[in-house]
Image (cartoon, helix red, strand yellow):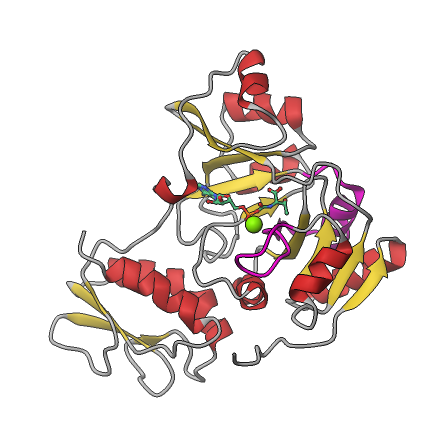
């Protein structure tokens, strides 16, 4: 195991005014903080900063990038980030704040880091009913990306002690707000022209959504979601120089046409990954090449995504 750059002592504070203030300072400084929601504890970071979001992945040791849920204060903030249709508004009016996540098209001017959506044109939004999550959103004025606050592969934490056992030494702060009410992640529903699709079971059941006059289609298993952005052009990995017709995305000593990080910083590289893949797609070159990325820390997740993007389709 390599020691992540963010390794630090983990402090646990009561989720009172002073605790929320401390969380605000850390989050505005680009660090992730664990805090309760009504479902499970989340590891929250500023969704407008790619580097802050990269530090969520670094702390969790997650071997791949998946789109994350963004927590908002309510409908007004959601409207600035996503495009809500009538159905999404009706669901938000009925279930927010609460354990319901809505997946909808992302606004072009949302200002959300591309690592949050893993490059997708859609975004998952939820307004938590928990006063601590609400308090930190209000204090920072930022939308917060927050997956469950556990190391990759571990079960979701419902108490501060669970977070400490899983992420102790890897995050600066846990706000202790006691045990969570549901202990189960939020229900996720995609809302698009096709209607409603239940993407994840959760505290609000399919029956309940149906009883609200809203028709739930078949459940999509998370693994089957078309939730992975890949460039439309062929992608060559481990390239130290560009071949004719290639747009080279560099890293470290491989300069390239553009660079994920000239300093070889994996947090910076993760933050830029999807932006530079989109950018490469838009260039005149017919193919994209990417410099070698070390398979350590966040590099594993970066390489996982690059290998998927390079796989024949
Ligand atoms: O209860 C919860 O929802 C917790 C607490 C902390 O709020 N959060 C949580 O977040 O479970 P996260 O980021 O682990 O959930 C991500 C789920 C994944 O299954 C992902 O595929 C789905 O949300 N998701 C996120 N954005 C999506 C998108 N644009 N399209 C489809 N699915 C999306
Ligand atoms: Mg989880």
Q: Position of residue 269 (x, y in %)?
A: 44, 72
Count of marks, rendered view: 0
Task: Answer yes or no: is residue 36 visible.
Answer: yes
In the rendered image, residue 208, in percent from the top left (x then y), is placed at 59, 18
The part of the chain drawn in magenta is 128-156
Task: Classify 301 as above or below 293.
Answer: above
Residue 165 location, quadrant: bottom right
Residue shown at 38%/44% (left/top)?
Answer: 223
Instruction: Indicate whether 191 appears above or below 62.
Output: above
Residue at the spot x=58%, y=56% of the render? 154
The residue positioned farthest toward the bottom in the image shown: 253
218 w.r.t. 158: above or below: above
Picture quadrant of residue 225: top left
- In the image, residue 240 lies at what x, y percent? 24, 83
Give the image quarter of residue 243.
bottom left
**Closer to us: 52 or 60:** 60
Query: At x 42% / y 78%, what residue is drawn?
Result: 261
- Nearest the viewer among 150 and 97 is 150
Residue 116 location, x and y as percent? 50, 54
Q: Is residue 145 magenta?
A: yes
217 drawn magenta: no
């Amino acid at each position: 195991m390599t020691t992540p750059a963010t390794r630090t002592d983990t402090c646990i504070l009561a989720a009172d005014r002073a605790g929320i203030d401390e969380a605000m300072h850390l989050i505005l400084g680009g660090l992730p903080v664990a805090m309760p929601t009504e479902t499970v504890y989340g590891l929250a970071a500023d969704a407008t900063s790619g580097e802050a979001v990269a530090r969520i992945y670094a702390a969790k040791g997650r071997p791949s990038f998946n789109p994350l849920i963004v927590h908002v204060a309510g409908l007004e903030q959601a409207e600035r980030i996503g495009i809500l249709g009538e159905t999404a508004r009706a669901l938000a009016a009925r279930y927010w704040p609460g354990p319901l996540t809505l997946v909808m098209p992302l606004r072009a001017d949302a200002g959300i880091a591309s690592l949050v959506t893993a490059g997708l044109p859609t975004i998952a939004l939820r307004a938590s009913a928990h006063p601590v999550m609400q308090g930190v959103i209000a204090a920072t004025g930022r939308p917060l990306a927050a997956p469950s606050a556990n190391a990759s592969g571990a079960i979701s934490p419902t108490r501060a002690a669970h977070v400490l056992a899983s992420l102790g030494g890897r995050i600066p702060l846990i706000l202790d707000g006691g045990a969570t009410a549901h202990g189960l992640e939020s229900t996720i529903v995609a809302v698009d022209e096709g209607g409603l699709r239940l993407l994840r079971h959760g505290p609000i059941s399919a029956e309940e959504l149906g009883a609200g006059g809203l028709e739930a289609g078949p459940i999509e298993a998370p693994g089957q979601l078309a939730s992975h952005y890949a460039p439309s052009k062929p992608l060559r990995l481990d390239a130290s120089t560009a071949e004719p017709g290639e747009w080279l995305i560099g890293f470290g000593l491989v300069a390239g046409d553009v660079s994920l990080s000239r300093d070889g910083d994996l947090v910076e590289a993760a933050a830029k990954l999807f932006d530079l893949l989109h950018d490469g797609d838009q260039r005149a070159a017919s193919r994209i090449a990417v410099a070698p990325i070390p398979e350590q820390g966040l590099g594993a997740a970066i390489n996982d995504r690059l290998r998927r993007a390079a796989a024949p389709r």
